[in-house]
Image: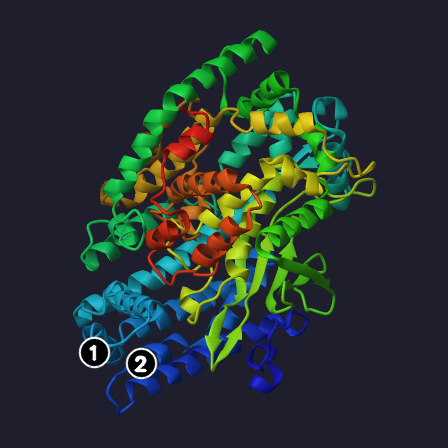
Amino acid sequence: MSQENPLLEPFDAAPFSKIKNEHFKPAFQEAIAKAKAEINNITSNEEAPTFKNTLEALEFAGETLSRVSSIFFNLNSAETNEEIQKIAQEVSPWLSEFSNDLTLNEELFKRVKAVYEQKDSLELSVEQKTLLDKHYKSFTRNGANLPEDKKEQLREIDKELSKLSLSFGENVLAETNRYELHVEDEKDLKGLPESELENANLLAKTKGKTGYIFTLQYPSYIPFMKYAENRELRKKLAIAFGAKGFQNDEYDNQENVLKIAKLRHQRANLLGYKTHAHFVLEERMAKSPEKVNDFLNEMLEKAKPAAEQEFQELEQFAKELDGIDHLEKWDSAYYAEKLKQKRFQLDDEQLKPYFKLDNVIHGVFTVAKKLYDLHFNEVFDIDKYHEEVKTYEVYDGDHNFMALFYADFHPREGKRNGAWMTIYKDQKVKDGKNERPHVSNVCNFTRPTSKKPSLLTFNEVTTLFHEFGHGLHGMLANSTYPSLSGASVYWDFVELPSQVLENWCYEPEALELFARHYETNEVIPMEMIEKIKKSANFHEGMQTVRQLSFGMLDMAWHAVDPSAINSVKENELKAFEATKLYPDVAENCMSTSFSHIFQGGYSAGYYSYKWAEVLDADAFAYFQEEGIFNKKVADKFKDNILSKGGTEDPMVLYKRFRGKEPNPEALLKRAGLI
């Protein structure tokens, strides 16, 4: 079979152009069979279990499967179609079954446990101890100590959960793709910048229509909400956006949400945990739901007074400007933008000419060079899954090859919303060779038009830096074992490298490197940089409360027994009570399109964005003390955090970099909340 299947032949970079959809299922079947044989070799080994013949062998088993999976599921996010989605529905249960066969394999567990029980007498390195601990826990946390009938129950739950989260995601994508706001008359679009009109007109033409089309994709949706004067149209688009998965039709996600929450809870109970959040948080820096709730409430206490004051100001402003008595959700971005312009004389449209996508890419590369001595060479002979993807080889200052980097920047029908970093090949040391990673950043930025290059909003600039920060975590990875490499860290630690890099976007020293006018090449004026810095805290109280509300919604699904919850909407309203500023919109529900927690891996983990902000504010304060391009601090960050991945406890790594535990005051200070 492997003769005709490019996924099963040896390759380094993914052979995208050779892969056809019909290759995936046979590749999965063969890769699973191969992985099972490798596991079988471990369990049938007559020799006594050792770290090498059991743990190391287990760590490197299933490599083919992991490569096939990463290629397939990355395509399902970045370049999918109905056929790929259908294959995903078929292979997902195979994968959860394989993963269950693995964690419920008694012979394998016996061997791992035997090594685990003598770990103190073995001379293991810190990384080896972490690996042993991780594998042992992956068995016990997945039911290795359960009786047979309970194991069976667990398998069924896992199969069902993998299907449900796929359906959830497909429904959100279908709802996003099928909605169009079609506007014939340009008079209805007053306030929208020229570039947005041009994009909307272009989209209408490609669909064989006249006028303008706006969609629920972020690059179309966000500018519309920010600039369109027509309140009725803003309302229409906002309601459509908030109603994804909540329309009692074939794409409705309410049933999926309830089922996922209840099955996760059952699974946690089966494993001896009180709730899904108790299960998840055992493997996080936060450790428990109580600590997460305390953290969220403490932050809310600091941010709420500021948020309420900002909300009143905004309401007053809208009233003075347009006689609006009550602010609704579809007014928030519009009036906030107007107020921001009035207060700082700064808007995205003034800034965009200075943020041509190519320049920003060059900028983030230059920052990486100054901090970590990395060099990016664009190459054109690497296979890619879409012609728009750019590919780069990454070298260090001594010309050592560090990584292959893929970058994919614009929205397409087959691509989910948002921005993310992902890996096509893990870094690891095997047979004495340090195999370097293949890392990808995927974003959804405005496309170039016939008249203009792709120009980014400032928010998109910080998004690019954010994802690239995750990318650096992958590219600079330097551990022995793939499951501890790069971004394979505790979930509430994973956002530190990404969020810390966003800070450079606000620093004159960094902006001068790349923020140049796309027509005149003039460097961004100093007063604009000043305004960017001043406006960074604009509505920080409301932004913080909004982020906290998402974390609280997550906990309202996962830190409780959800068996009595029958209404998704009611549970959501209850969760939002403490953070509510705007009136509720009856037609809308966030949970039904909250992909982070029902499709991505953020269940019981959404708080980690704010948690990581505490780490990043504290870490960046260190850079500011010593200079934002200070080599000594950058080396400490690279050596203790970026290259170490998950090889040690994150708090130990952080303290080694910083010399002390993170101080939450750094974040509150940066946010102007104290």
Quadrant position of residue 445? top right
Residue type at numbered disc 2 = Thr
Residue type at numbered disc 1 = Ala
| Mark 1 surroundings: few (<14), some (14-19) or many (≥20) residues within 10 A | some
| Mark 2 surroundings: few (<14), some (14-19) or many (≥20) residues within 10 A | many
Quick one: 34 or 532, which is closer to the camera? 532
User: Extreme left residue here?
Assistant: 147
Q: Name the residue under label 2.
A: 54
- The N terminus, quarter of image: bottom right
Quick one: 220 or 514, which is closer to the camera? 514
For mark 2, give the secondary structure.
helix
Q: Is residue 378 left or right of residue 591?
A: right
2 and 1 marks in contact (CB < 8 Å): yes
Horizontal and vertical percent for residue 644?
A: 43, 61
Q: Residue at x 55, y 51 (%)?
A: 631
> Above or below — where is 666 with respect to 112?
above
Q: Which residue is drawn at 35% across and 34% down?
A: 572
Quadrant position of residue 421? bottom right
For mark 1, give the secondary structure.
helix
Horizontal and vertical percent for residue 537?
A: 51, 27
Q: Residue at x 19, y 72 (%)?
A: 148
Q: Which residue is drawn at 60% across and 10% down?
A: 321
Quadrant position of residue 237? top right
Which disc, if any, is residue 82? none
| First reached walking from the N terminus: tag 2 or tag 1 | 2
> Above or below — where is 316 with respect to 425?
above
Residue 25 visible in the snapshot: yes
Which disc, if any, is residue 114? 1
Horizontal and vertical percent for residue 327?
A: 50, 17
Horizontal and vertical percent for residue 64?
A: 49, 77
